[in-house]
Image (spheres, rainbow, N blue to C red):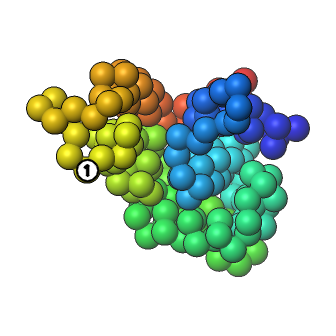
Amino acid sequence: MVLLCYNILFLSLFRKQTTLKRKIVFNKETEYALRGLVYIQTQNMLGKKPGIVEIAKEIDSPQFYMAKILQRLVRLGFIASTKGKGGGFYFDVEKPELPLKDLILATEGDRTFSGCGFGLKQCDENNRCPLHDQYAPIRNAINKLVSEDTVQSLAKNISK
């Protein structure tokens, strides 16, 4: 049930349905990081610190890849972890909520928010690509969505 809720939430926020196939807006690292952090936060709200095996299983990700992602997020200070019995991953309650945009910038850089929809390196108002006018509102909408939401707000929405 938990996995289903995460998948529904993730699909509603980060995937675009087409008649042919689904298009993923973010790369796999970002997808797993978002899903993993939301799962960690929902468990933290219940007073639990989930471990890597549990997180990977619940969000349906490869365990070793998820471990690498979470280690990087710990090094970046987004989450903390403790080893041993009773250990696991958790958000420091003293820190401010984690905006989705900060996480995406850390995993993908700023190409999602400033890149060309056609994939060109030199695309701007003076040097427009064939998709420039159509892609700009999409990029702006993604930027707005991830600037307003946090990992914690997504977790609270799941818990309702």
Q: State the residue position of label 1.
A: 121
Q: Is residue 30 visible?
A: yes
Residue 148 in sight? no
Q: Position of residue 39 (x, y in %)?
A: 68, 47
Residue at the farthest front position: 130
**Residue drawn at the location 71% of the way across and 32% of the way down:** 20
Q: Is residue 115 above or below residue 136?
A: below
Residue 21 falls in image quadrant: top right
Q: Position of residue 142 (x, y in %)?
A: 43, 30
Q: Is residue 5 above or below residue 87?
A: above
Residue at image point 38% right, 37% down: 117
Q: Nearer the viewer, residue 149 or 156?
A: 149
Is 137 drawn above or below residue 35 in the view shown? above
Tell me which residue sits at (56%, 66%) in the image.
69
Instruction: Tell me which residue sits at (53%, 40%) in the image.
Output: 25
Residue 109 picture location, percent across and down: 35, 54
Mark 1: which amino acid?
Lys
